Amino acid sequence: MKASASANSNIALVKYWGKRDAKLFLPHNGSISITLDGLNTHTTCAFSDKLAGDKVDIDGKAVQGAELKQASAFLDIIRGMAKTKARARVVSKNNFPAAAGLASSASGFAALALAAGKAAGLNLDQKQLSLLARRGSGSACRSIYGGFVEWQKGSKSDGSDSHAIQLAKPTHWPEIRVIAAITSRQAKKIKSRAGMAQTVSTSPFYPAWKATVEQDLDGMRQAVMAKNFRMLGQIAEHNCLKMFGTMITTKPAILYWSPKSVEILHAVMGWREEGLECYFTCDAGPQVKVLCLARDEKETSQRLLALQDIEIIVSRPGGDAHTVSRHLF
Ligand code: PMV
């Protein structure tokens, strides 16, 4: 059977950074994100006994090497659940540049979990899909749900309680805007997987990260439920800088920011002093995501574009991952 699915990417307001179990993708800490309607992956999957190996195409290019291995390992989990040995054909399309720090792995593995699960004849509910997507890329477990989402780290060693839940639907706070400022289209040198492993094992600040993240999660839950934008922005910015603090103090140091990224951070802080309420957050890459409310979307976008040499993608809170009838092959 052939099945297709669509999933949105997400931006973490309180970050997932560091695994306690690298094989099962179990995090040291919980995280909270907004699902983004502007960054979407559409994926079609079909299993066939006639295929000699898995064939995966992303944005018109055949995936090879380590990336194909990773996709096959993920498909193996689904094959194990469905008790089949059939190989898969997967075709996937992003509506944004992949591997440039815009979390293509989050929407990618969420869409693949749903499309491949259905193609394999599994009828998984959202919790099961979130548990499955997590095994492809941690942040993907949050992209199963729309709106405001928390990945609960869980405590069980088999990972059965480490999945996302929805804190609030996108309609709870539709005025939130996330403006992704793309400063570079080059694939990052150090993938988040390697970056977080290096942080956990070498940064002297990692214990401080772990000791303070619960506080950020508590505050962020409150900010989301009360629709307190200032509180949301302040915690998101602080949490992002704290994560970067752990990254730049690894051995050897990891510095994901480019000069352009830092220019945007200064600009956002300056605009805020002038009364434009916006905040930044970044992931393991040079892109900067600027948070603002609908009333300031135009002004913030214009000011970002005036900084030159960047592109922007504006997102609103997006919906759940869902199956779609349009197949890509
Ligand atoms: O799921 P991964 O392996 O792409 O890791 C994501 C890590 C961050 O983007 C930096 C933070 C997060 O919570 O999304």
Image (tube, helix red, strand yellow):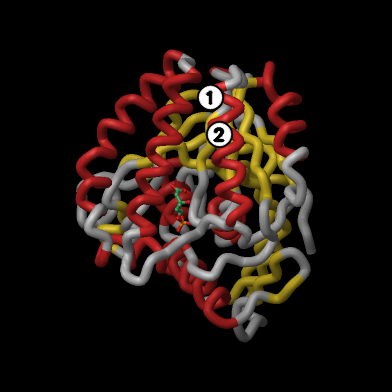
User: Residue 226, relative to residue 38: is it above or below?
Assistant: above
The location of residue 230, given as percent across then percent down, is: 47, 19
Q: Is residue 194 visible?
A: yes
Number of marks present in the image shown: 2
Kindly identify which numbered label has been placed on residue 169: 1
Query: What residue would you read off at disc 2?
Result: 146
Quadrant of the snapshot with the C terminus = bottom right
The residue type indicated by label 1 comes to Lys
Q: Residue at x 61, y 36 (%)?
A: 267
Mark earlier in primary sequence (1, 2): 2
Identify which residue, 319 or 50, lies in the foreground: 319
Q: Quadrant of residue 55?
A: bottom right
Rounded to the nearest angstrom, the CA distance separating label 1 from label 2 is 6 Å
Q: Is residue 86 visible?
A: no
The location of residue 269, given as percent across then percent down, is: 54, 32
Q: Quadrant of residue 158?
A: bottom left
The location of residue 58, given as percent across then percent down, is: 70, 66
The residue type indicated by label 2 comes to Gly
Q: Residue at x 60, y 20 (%)?
A: 274
Quadrant of the snapshot with the N terminus = bottom right
Q: Residue at x 73, y 24 (%)?
A: 299
Judge from the rendering whether residue 211 lies leftward or rightward of residue 59; answer left or right.
left
Residues at marks 1 and 2 touching, judged by CB atoms closer than 8 Å: yes
Mark 2 nearby-residue class (10 Å; few <14, some 14–19, many ≥20)? many
Judge from the rendering whether residue 97 lies leftward or rightward of residue 251; answer left or right.
right
Q: What is the residue that sits farthest to the top in this orientation?
A: 226
